[in-house]
Amino acid sequence: MNSSYLRFVLMSLLLIAVQVWVLSPVELFRVATPFVYPFVLMLLPLGANRSLLPILGFAIGGAIDVLGLTPGIHAAAMTLAAFVRYPLLQVLTDKEMPPSALPLYGTLRSGAIILMSLLLLIHHLALYLLVGATLHRDPYVLLSFAAGYGLSWLIGLILLFFFGTEPPHRS
């Protein structure tokens, strides 16, 4: 098994567990819930199969829904984020990048931050539009969206720099 796909599977399982059992019950100031599981889309290689991305997004979001007892909103939001990953990468990457490279900070530099920000934004917009359709408190949903996106972006930025750096090579 390719090391990037092994990293993806292990980090998917870890981030799903952290999201369901640590981050979802936490609401910062009773407003912001961070959703960092869309970060696993950053751990797939640039040349990942386009038709496999929405399936993986649905599987990851579905696992969050099943474990978190939510009615499919995470699966829908993650499927959308996975669907738009490829067009975003087409805009942000060079054509001479190897398809096995990961879209992390070590490869894309500021493009990785833009990609992570856009994936989180699309995911959060879809998630909060689905939640906002059932809640009739628009100011609260907007405040929760802004605070949740900001906290998710901050945690995602930390993860991006943590995974984007390579360990020093031994001589």
Image: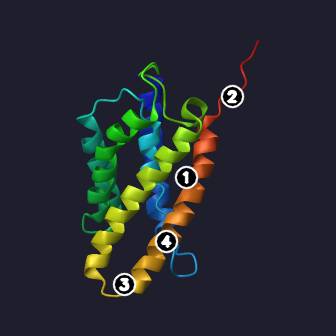
Compare marks 3 and 2 and give the one earlier in the sequence.
3
Question: Measured from the top left, where is residue 65 in percent x and y?
Answer: 31, 62
SS of the residue at dot 4?
A: helix
Check contact, mark 3 vs mark 1: CB within 8 A: no
Q: Residue at x 48, y 42 (%)?
A: 11
Viewer-proximal residue among 139 and 55:
139
Marks 1 & 2, CB-CB < 8 Å contact: no
Instruction: Label 2: state its secondary structure.
Output: loop
- The residue carrying pointer 2 sits among few (fewer than 14), some (14 to 19) or many (20 or more) residues within 10 Å by Cα, namely few
Q: Are marks 3 and 2 in contact (CB under 8 Å)?
A: no
For this rendering, which residue is in front, 29 or 120? Answer: 120
Q: Residue at x 58, y 56 (%)?
A: 155
Residue under circle 2? 167
- CB-based contact (under 8 Å), mark 3 and mark 4: no
* Residue 63 visible to the viewer: yes
The answer to whether one can see residue 25 in this image is no
Give the CA distance from mark 1 to mark 2: 20 Å
Left or right, 144 with respect to 113, comes to left
Q: CA distance from mark 1 to mark 4?
A: 15 Å
The reply to whether callout 1 and callout 4 are in contact (CB within 8 Å) is: no
- Identify the element where label 1 is drawn: helix
